[in-house]
């Protein structure tokens, strides 16, 4: 159980919202970022993911840290929308 500074939560939440992250995602990630900040004894700005056009950009290190505190059936992953050579070969006109 961690106690959080509500002002830090509001700051992170507001920053995520200002970058077009959905309200629900911002609420969840603000809490998780603060929990990780306490767990690793680092400033939240070291854990706050980059946000570009409303999409979170997570490094493998941040993803590993986020998943450390999540249950096994609720892990985060990375998906890519770049077609691989194999996918292009299977593409039907």
Image (cartoon, rainbow, N blue to C red):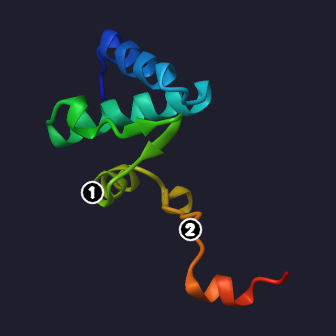
- Residue with the most extreme front position: 93
Camera-side residue: 37 or 79? 79
For the point 30% across and 16% down, the residue is 8
For the point 60% across and 24% down, the residue is 23
- Residue 89 position within the rendered picture, expressed as x and y whole percent measured from the top left: 68, 90
Quadrant of the rendered image containing residue 42: top left
Residue 73 visible, this orientation: yes
Q: Assess disc 2: are there few (<14), some (14-19) or many (≥20) residues with their C-alpha within 10 Å of its C-alpha.
A: few
For the point 54% across and 63% down, the residue is 79
Checking the image for residue 73, the label placed there is none
Camera-side residue: 13 or 5? 13
- Residue 85 position within the rendered picture, expressed as x and y whole percent measured from the top left: 57, 86
For the point 41% across and 47% down, the residue is 57
Checking the image for residue 61, the label placed there is 1
- Residue with the most extreme top position: 7
Q: Is residue 75 left or right of residue 62?
A: right
- Residue with the most extreme right position: 93
Q: Which residue is under mark 2?
A: 82
Quadrant for the N terminus, please. Answer: top left
Task: Give the Cα separation between the discs numbered 2 and 1.
Answer: 22 Å
Q: Is residue 81 above or below residue 31?
A: below
Quadrant for the C terminus, please. Answer: bottom right
- Mark 2 or mark 1: which comes first in sequence? 1
- Residue 64 position within the rendered picture, expressed as x and y whole percent measured from the top left: 33, 58
Is the Cβ of the residue at disc 2 closer than 8 Å to that at disc 1? no
Q: Assess disc 1: are there few (<14), some (14-19) or many (≥20) residues with their C-alpha within 10 Å of its C-alpha.
A: few
Q: Is residue 92 above or below residue 16?
A: below
- Residue 49 position within the rendered picture, expressed as x and y whole percent measured from the top left: 35, 40
Camera-side residue: 40 or 81? 81
The nearer-to-camera label among 2 and 1 is 2
């Amino acid at each position: 159980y961690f106690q959080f500074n509500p002002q830090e939560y509001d700051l992170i939440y507001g920053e995520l919202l200002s970058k077009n992250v959905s309200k629900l995602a911002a609420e969840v990630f603000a809490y998780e970022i603060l929990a990780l900040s306490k767990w690793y004894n680092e400033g939240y700005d070291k854990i706050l993911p980059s946000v570009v056009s409303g999409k979170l950009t997570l490094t493998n290190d941040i993803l590993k840290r986020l998943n450390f505190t999540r249950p096994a059936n609720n892990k985060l992953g990375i998906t890519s929308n770049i077609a691989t050579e194999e996918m292009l070969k299977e593409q039907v006109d």
